[in-house]
Image (cartoon, rainbow, N blue to C red):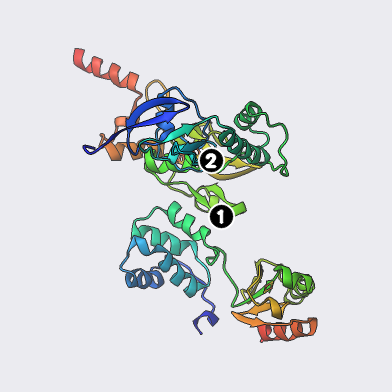
Amino acid sequence: MDDAKTITITINGKQVQTTEGRYLLEVCRENGVDIPTLCHHEAVSPAGACRLCAVEVGDGKGRSRIVASCIYPCWDGMVVETESPRAVGVRRLVLETLLARAPKVPVIRDLARRYGIRRPRFPLENHQCILCGLCVRVCSEVVGVHALSMQGRGAEKECGTPYLSGESTCIGCGACVYVCPTECIHMEDRDGVRTIWHEDAGVKTSVRQFKLKYCKVCGAPLGPEYQLEYIRKKVGLPEDFHDLCPGCRATGRRVAATT
Amino acid sequence: MEAMNPTTPSGCLCEDVDPILDRYGRDQGLLVSILQDIQEKYRYLPKEALERVSAALDVPMAQVYAVATFFKAFSLKPRGRHVVQVCMGTACHVRGAPLIRDKLERDLGVKNGETAADLSVTLESVNCVGACALGPVVVLDDEVQGHVTLTKVDALVKKVRS
Ligand code: SF4
Ligand code: SF4
Ligand code: FES
Ligand code: FES
């Protein structure tokens, strides 16, 4: 952007320069100020889903408000307090509700402990999924497959494949498994089959299975057949490209060159 | 009334869905209106219809499904030819709505929130239809029935059965 304007903002009393419109969370982190997050990941667009990144933003004249820093664009002269009693209070409340929803999830427990929350005032539930939507965004924005979505609304909201069924556009890449902060998406490779599923409150949903492909020479696992085919078509690789693992392919080339 | 004819969809449903899609110029931005028309046609959103919409509009199925499950007006499950809604809002509740609901469940032979296997009727509860002064209220096929008593339920059930 050519018309990007350089601005000065104050974070916890320290003046820093940045570009107008950048998201506050990024700017804070660049300047060594840590803010906890659960629904944020550099690889995907921010969603403001968890509200854990709450900070206090003021105009320097005594007026201030709480904002979700991951989706809040910076403006000139703003005064940011990340550890003010108000900001910390909001984060505590967020963690208290999250702990009530997912009391057994390690990241949530750790964060709650850090904020001095032992027992939430709210009735305990037994979820793992915190509805952060990271799996959905990774699948659509990074993988480009759009296999997942948030479904329903309110208390019945959940995430998974359409109809929570195995029939979906999922290619079995495992990106969602990797990005899920609460580890409620599982992946298992066994007996030549990869299985990926969501598991929440003890219920397995969106169970999808893929036949795995192995190197024709050394037998090393290459990945789900369907995914390899998807990549091959997308990139325009030759049909037999995924018959061999990279090692055996290189050896094959060397042998061909010397004979 | 179109909704009176039971339609048991099968196959790809293109024949029914495509005209609806065309009516809206196959515009992705009009997804909700398209789904509304499909819902009107089948009284619910059949999976095959959603798949057709997804393919025709080039909108991922996951996205179509997210929209379909977001709005309360849409149903993903088949609904009955008649829809009986019992108001369980506060005003109706204190005037005996639970008794009305229990009797409807018994007499219609369907649980609250469910549809009869023969698709004759769907029974569901709603929260306040804005006619509190008439409570307890039952809505039969969009028609508000006020001051419902157990005897009135008999008449309602008869209407559904006829
Ligand atoms: S494993 Fe499937 S659902 Fe998960 S990111 Fe990859 S394609 Fe999407
Ligand atoms: S499954 Fe994981 S990544 Fe997806 S919404 Fe739930 S917590 Fe977030
Ligand atoms: S990290 Fe900002 S709302 Fe979740
Ligand atoms: S509570 Fe039943 S109509 Fe308002």
Task: Indicate which disc residue A153 carries.
Answer: 1
Q: Position of residue B135 (x, y in %)?
A: 72, 77
Q: Is residue A29 visible?
A: yes
- Figure quadrant of residue A111: top right
Where B68 sits versus A83, above or below? Answer: below
- Figure quadrant of residue A144: top left
In the rendered structure, the residue with mark 2 lies on which chain? A
Q: Position of residue A19 (x, y in %)?
A: 31, 33
Where A76 sits versus B9, above or below? Answer: above
Dot 1 falls on a residue whose secondary structure is loop
Q: Residue furthest top?
A: A258
Of the residues shown, which amino acid type is indicated by label 1?
A: Arg
Q: Is residue A172 visible?
A: no
Q: Is mark 1 within 8 Å of ligand 2?
A: no
Of the residues shown, which amino acid type is indicated by label 2?
A: Arg
Task: Indicate which disc residue A51 carries.
Answer: 2
Indicate the quadrant containing the C terminus of chain A: top left, top right, bottom left or bottom right. Answer: top left
Q: Residues within 10 Å of mark 1 (few under 14, many from 20)?
A: few
Quarter of the render that holds ligand 1: top left
Dot 2 falls on a residue whose secondary structure is loop
Q: Position of residue A125 (x, y in %)?
A: 69, 43
Q: Which residue is depicted at the point 71% across and 43% down?
A: A122
Where A219 sits versus A154, above or below? Answer: above
Indicate the quadrant containing the N terminus of chain A: top left, top right, bottom left or bottom right. Answer: top left
Sequence-wise first label, 1 or 2: 2
Labels 1 and 2 touching (C-beta < 8 A):
no
In the rendered structure, the residue with mark 1 lies on which chain? A
- In the figure, is residue A27 to the left or right of A6? right
Which of A147 and B63 lies nearest the eye of the viewer?
B63
